């Protein structure tokens, strides 16, 4: 449900109704009480607008003004995002970290990458054993701990309506994906990254 929007005219009318009635309290346009109510109404309208914006800005997926507070709470920005990440990339990283429940399954890493804005698949490997098919490459025991993240060569993040002015139209790259996945990968595993065309 959207927050109610109260205009300066609405606040002025409400304030004028609160004033006492009588000949020394004229409420016509241009009178002293009218001008005073108009000044107060402007302040109340601005405060009401900012309060309504706070309802939108309080959520990580739609925040702009409170984004630095969300980032400092979650240990961001970090070197993963590069020198000048877009607002959308920063929001995605905040949302991914705040909704991160932890895990080490394939489904967990795919969902985490999706929260970051990346579509990936994961390939798991196994060492070759007696009975494996002939003609396949032989792999040692380390392959039991290896897995591969398959992602597009470039993931493009486009500017969206509501993003701040001064942001680039599009950003592409997978640096954030690599950094965040490596930070969450189980310590005994070997993570490989494969970027398709």
Image (cartoon, rainbow, N blue to C red):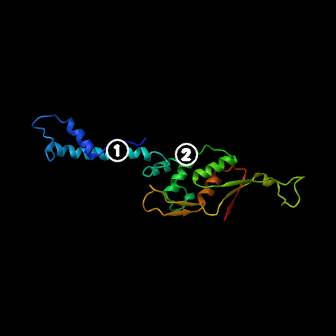
Label 1 SS: loop
In this rendering, the answer to whether 52 lies above or below 123 is above
| Residue 74 in the image, given as x and y percentages of width and height | 53, 48
Disc 2 crowd rating (10 Å Cα; few below 14, some 14-19, many 20+) is few
Q: Is residue 61 above or below residue 20?
A: below
Q: Quadrant of the C terminus?
A: bottom right
Residue positioned most to the bottom:
197
Q: Measure the alpha-carbon separation of dots 2 and 1.
A: 30 Å
Residue at image point 57% right, 58% down: 80
Q: Residue at x 51, y 52 (%)?
A: 91
Q: Nearer the viewer, mark 2 or mark 1?
A: 1
Quadrant containing the N terminus is top left
Instruction: Tell me if 185 is positioned left or right of 6 in this view.
Output: right
> In the rendered image, which residue does mark 1 sit on?
5
Q: Position of residue 79 (x, y in %)?
A: 56, 58
Report x, y in % for residue 141.
Answer: 82, 53
Residue 87: horizontal and vertical position, in percent? Answer: 48, 56
Q: Quick one: 68 or 56, which is closer to the camera? A: 56
Name the foreground residue: 143 vs 37.
37
Q: Which residue is identified by label 2? A: 98
Query: Pointer 1: residues within 10 angstroms few (<14), some, or many (20+)?
Result: few
* Residue at disc 2, secondary structure: helix
Labels 2 and 1: the sequence-earlier one: 1
Q: Quadrant of residue 14?
A: top left
User: Could you tell me which residue is drawn at 43 percent across and 62 percent down?
Assistant: 166
């Amino acid at each position: 449900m959207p927050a109610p929007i109260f205009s300066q005219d609405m606040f002025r009318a409400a304030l004028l109704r609160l004033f006492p009635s009588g000949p020394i309290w004229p409420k016509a346009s241009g009178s002293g009480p009218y001008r005073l109510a108009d000044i107060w109404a402007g302040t109340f309208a601005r405060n009401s607008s900012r309060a309504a914006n706070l309802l939108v800005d309080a959520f990580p997926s739609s925040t702009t003004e409170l984004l630095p507070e969300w980032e400092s709470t979650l240990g961001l920005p970090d070197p993963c995002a590069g020198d000048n990440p877009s607002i959308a990339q920063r929001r995605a990283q905040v949302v991914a970290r705040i909704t991160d429940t932890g895990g080490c399954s394939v489904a967990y890493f795919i969902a985490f990458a999706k929260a970051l804005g990346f579509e990936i698949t994961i390939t798991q490997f196994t060492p070759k054993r007696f009975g494996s098919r002939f003609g396949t490459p032989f792999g040692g025991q380390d392959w039991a701990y290896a897995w591969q993240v398959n992602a597009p060569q470039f993931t493009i993040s486009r500017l969206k309506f509501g993003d701040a002015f001064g942001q680039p139209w599009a950003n592409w790259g997978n640096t954030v994906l690599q950094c965040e996945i490596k930070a969450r990968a189980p310590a005994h595993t070997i993570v490989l990254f494969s970027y398709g065309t």
